[in-house]
Amino acid sequence: MSSVMIEDRNKLGRGHRDKVQQFMTITGASEKVALQALKASDWHLEGAFDVFYNQPQYGFYQYADMILADGISILCNDLQVDPQDIVMLVVSWHMKAATMCEFSKQEFIGGLQSLGIDSLEKFRERIPFMRTELKDEQKFREIYNFAFSWAKEKGQKSLALDTAIGMWQLLFAEKQWPLVDHWCQFLQARHNKAISRDTWSQLLEFARTVDPALSNYDAEGAWPYLIDEFVEYLTENGIIQKDNSAFLALKQLVLNSLLGDRQILA
């Protein structure tokens, strides 16, 4: 039990403490939920029951003004989902969350209402559906573009390189792109700076439209300079060589990816 909760309980008069105990006994709720429901009803026991039973039951989340990292960790535990699971990005997209690792009450409740979720049980049941949304080309694009603003630090225009690399590895594990590891290695070796929104959005277009063997790459195209430098890096390091076995090996890798996942980016 948190020190804040103990302090709140110790400040209560006997009558209020009795109501908390009654509420917990009848509803089976925790002391924290009991305190919050009773405070919300101005300590009227029947009003507190109305708050508890007539609102969607999202657990303690329905009472929190902000759900921060610790609260999200509890939420993931309740949902039986790893906090690093990409489905939590999809959840955040549905919530229209402004910042990674936090939800405002408005974002959280509004997102769940839009999904038709009114209990933790229904939340768990919707997780498989949210995973399938990553397979939808248009939704994946929306989630990908959402991730830039969601993952960057507040007040920053660009995305920290380490964060961007982590997000790319997460996203392109879902939508396979054979060059993602080379891209991340290139950035660490040659760029080592924050990533702009333009580079972020254009990379998805590059991955979707340019063959991983670069057979249809147009050097005169309007790609950001960083993507053009990446193509040079691939050539300079012998990663893309159209006339030798390295090229054939990469081509085979692409074919294997296509056979393994029909949803690979075209």
Image (cartoon, rainbow, N blue to C red):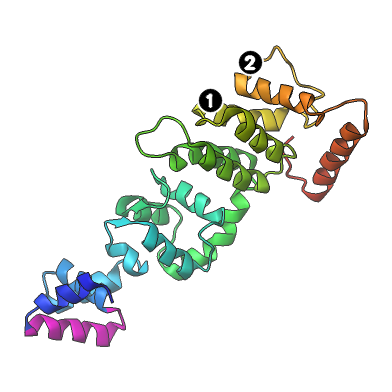
Using the image as rendered, state which of residue 208 and residue 74 is in the foreground.
Answer: 74
Residue found 60% across the figure and 41% down from its top? 168
The residue indicated by pointer 1 is: 198
Whether the magenta-drawn stretch holds residue 33 is answered as no
Using the image as rendered, state which of residue 143 and residue 248 is in the foreground.
Answer: 248
Tell which circle, 2 or 1, labels the residue nearer the N-terminal end: 1
Assign a secondary structure to mark 2. loop
The residue indicated by pointer 2 is: 222
Residue type at mark 1: give it: Asp
Image spot of residue 78 (x, y percent): 46, 70
Assign a secondary structure to mark 1. helix
Residue type at mark 2: give it: Ala
Q: Give the range drawn in magenta.
A: 14-30
Image spot of residue 56 (x, y percent): 34, 66
Left or right side of 81 for 21: left
Q: Is residue 5 among the parts visible in the rendering?
A: yes
Q: How many labels does the image show?
A: 2
Q: Is residue 142 among the parts visible in the rendering?
A: no
Whether the magenta-drawn stretch holds residue 22 is answered as yes
Residue found 63% across the figure and 19% down from its top? 223
Residue occupying the far front of the picture: 189
As drawn, 23 above or below 251: below
| Disc 1 residue crowd, few under 14, some 14–19, many 20+, Cα 10 Å | few
Image spot of residue 214 (x, y percent): 79, 26
Residue found 50% across the figure and 28% down from its top? 196
